[in-house]
Image (spheres, rainbow, N blue to C red):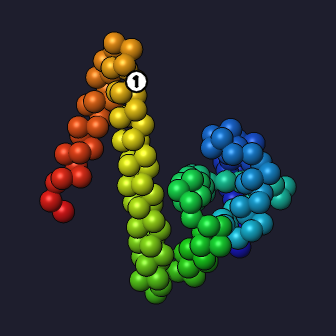
Amino acid sequence: MTTQADSNGLSIAEVAARTGLTAHTLRYYERDGLMLGVGRNGSGHRAYSEGDLGWITLITRLRSTGMPIREIRRYAEMVRDGSGNEEARLALLRAHRDRVRAQLEETAAHLDAIEFKVSYYAAAVGETDPDAELIAQQRRADAAAPR
């Protein structure tokens, strides 16, 4: 779904510069159904709105946290379909949030092991690493906190 945009819309080059994505990636997002509907200016060129930029930021975050393209596409389809499917959107986002939280917990455990080794080797060479010890203590306190 493309719409006629006002002359103040952002060009694909401007959006690429602001988001750090390539023009190729932005075209792919649109072609693959990940965008909600980028407007066009009078000459037929893409004219992105601030709302489009917000959507691009969201889908970039979803991709960066491991959401598969097919799930982002499904989410975009639900948003384009309008109201009435909020429960399905919520379920999709909750499932992704739970996966991200599990990944964070696993990464934190890996970081704890690295912090331990940094502290160990710092002590072995006669140094102290206050950052590593402080972080390890905080992680242990967080793990012991009631949930």
- Left or right, 146 with respect to 35, comes to left
Q: Quadrant of the C terminus?
A: bottom left
Q: Is residue 115 visible?
A: yes
- Left or right, 17 with respect to 116, comes to right
The answer to which image quadrant residue 135 occupies is top left
Residue type at tag 1? Tyr
Residue for point 65% across, 67% down = 69
Residue for point 35% across, 35% down = 116
Q: Is residue 4 visible?
A: no
The answer to which image quadrant residue 114 occupies is top left
Q: Nearer the viewer, residue 12 or 138?
A: 138
Q: Quadrant of the N terminus?
A: bottom right
Q: Nearer the viewer, residue 119 or 104?
A: 119
Which residue position holds label 1? 121
Query: Considering only vertical position in the picture, is 3 above or below 144?
Result: below
Residue for point 36% across, 41% down = 112
Residue 79 spot, x, y in % from top left: 54, 75
Residue 73 spot, x, y in % from top left: 64, 72
Q: Nearer the viewer, residue 127 or 10?
A: 127
Residue for point 22% across, 49% down = 142
The answer to which image quadrant residue 46 occupies is bottom right
Question: Farthest residue toward the right?
Answer: 43
